[in-house]
Amino acid sequence: MGKLLVVGSVALDTVATPFGEANEVLGGSATYFSTSASYFTSVDLIAVVGEDFPEKHLAFLKSRRIDLAGLERRPGQTFRWRGQYSHQLNEAQTLDTKLNVFESFRPKLPAQYRTPDVLFLGNIDPELQLEVLSQVTRPALVACDTMNFWINGKRDALWKVLEQIDVLIINDGEARALGEHPNLVQVAKKILSRGPKHLVIKRGEYGVLMFDGRGYFGAPAYPLEQVLDPTGAGDTFAGGFLGYLAATGNRSPDAFRQATIFGSVMASFTVEAFSLDRLRVLDYKEIEARFKEFKRLTHFEDLPT
Amino acid sequence: MGKLLVVGSVALDTVATPFGEANEVLGGSATYFSTSASYFTSVDLIAVVGEDFPEKHLAFLKSRRIDLAGLERRPGQTFRWRGQYSHQLNEAQTLDTKLNVFESFRPKLPAQYRTPDVLFLGNIDPELQLEVLSQVTRPALVACDTMNFWINGKRDALWKVLEQIDVLIINDGEARALGEHPNLVQVAKKILSRGPKHLVIKRGEYGVLMFDGRGYFGAPAYPLEQVLDPTGAGDTFAGGFLGYLAATGNRSPDAFRQATIFGSVMASFTVEAFSLDRLRVLDYKEIEARFKEFKRLTHFEDLPT
């Protein structure tokens, strides 16, 4: 079982959707990622929280086999995000972001974290992503996320990151902004020509597309009767995707396709409740059952050859 | 090979996309549908054109084995539609609609059209769809399309149509408007409880979802490097879907899934060029090849049981 290292945010979220509200609940990209990945492998977490971060959240993360030696606690307040969703649940509207201790976050890796098998650079300043890369022995697999704020504001540093990674996991709006083209096939060609060997494009309720230079793989999202809160779906996807690849060590095209489905499975659970509430009570048997439902959902008979 | 009957519009379109323009070209829901279906089976067409409708278009439709005994030519001008698309190609902006002879269209079926195996009620006034239904011996399979204009303006007549059909083929915005709910799973339950046994939801570049009361089937759209003109994609999908089902006579769940893929294949060709230009030069071998590409695009290994 491979060692998986993630760097990203641990936050307290306040979220309103048409179906309810959650105040000051556990959130953050690294939180969703590592909880999701923890169903497949053990996870080392690099992040920062403030003095106000509740002990119960630390206890939860520990209960999920997530190593917190790299979770720094600093004077000040924890990163807070406040957002809302309309009935069109695919996109969050950010109402307020207070970076707090996250503003001066400089990831420092404990010695035992410096030889991961798989590394996920969550959505942080690309210059910090480069600092993390400089502190590790090149892992077998490096993946990264980003957002339009960095695509527009730190494009050069971001391309330096992309030159050094294997998998870029972003949403379709980000892909179009980074590739500077509306057509995703052309965007994929452009991005894959500059470093990453895989581009995974998350499309929320519309599913996911993966490009690998030889072709593509597409899967719909799991049709859910009720989506309570889409927050963290993308990071949960990445956690399932990389958690599975870290656990198996398999890097075949088939393994990447299965990883995409495991990512989709984990994301489909996350959005069924606010915060990490669904992932808290999830059972691995449920994950396997939904994977098989994805198979039934997408299967059709090929034509005779 | 089953007999397929379609009622809908035959039009002259003027379309502008970021990649070019087409002036007064062949268009209309029944045109796209029947040309697409003609790759699978013979088609009887019910529609109306004006005195100005070019002979060359009639010659083209005839060349595709489309029976034109039900294509009425009336005094006046042919239905004209003018629209444009931005780089976000998923939705047309209508600039002008001139119904012309289509305004007083009353479908009258020639005697030899009254016993079709499969009937497609294209997007016309639901009261006219009811008139068509009253003129046929109940076919083995009846499918229908509609649009927000009828969903909002003639809801009662539309539900009367839906009570009598087997398959409703609409886009996701229309499904949400008809089901009066943002969640597509709940929309599907509601619609399927009132008549149709299958609901096919077209999502443009995001693919398609089919609900059949027992479960669902999802497929991505074919990732194209260039989409020149999305006009007619939905009707082309319906033509491939029903053309295949009419040709085989198979009504198994597997056949409906394959039909969904054939519909997606046909739509993926249509958008590669303006008007019917790609369908004009298409070869059945290309259709089979792209079907197999859909299989490669969506296949993943199931978990061991």
Image (spheres, coloured by chain):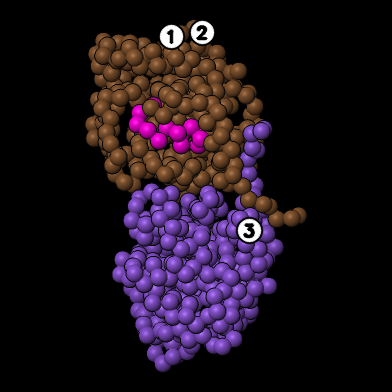
Chain colours: A brown, B purple
Q: How many marks?
A: 3
Could you tell me which residue is drawn at 33 percent across and 47 percent down? Answer: A88
> Marks 1 and 2: CB-CB under 8 Å?
yes
- Return the residue at label 3: B252
Q: Kindly identify which chain the residue marked by label 3 belongs to.
A: B
Labels 3, 2: front one: 3
Q: Is residue B225 above or below residue A110?
A: below
Q: Are marks 3 and 2 on the same chain?
A: no
Q: Residues within 10 Å of mark 1 (few under 14, many from 20)?
A: some
Instruction: Identify the amino acid type marked 2.
Output: Gln
Mark 1 falls on what kind of element? loop
Distance in Å between CA atoms under marks 3 and 2: 57 Å
Q: Which mark is on residue A112?
A: 2
- Return the residue at label 1: A69
Mark 3 falls on what kind of element? loop
Residue B272, percent from left and from top? 54, 61
Instruction: Identify the amino acid type marked 1.
Output: Ala
Instruction: Identify the amino acid type marked 3.
Output: Ser
Please give the range of residues in magenta: A263-276
Mark 2 falls on what kind of element? helix
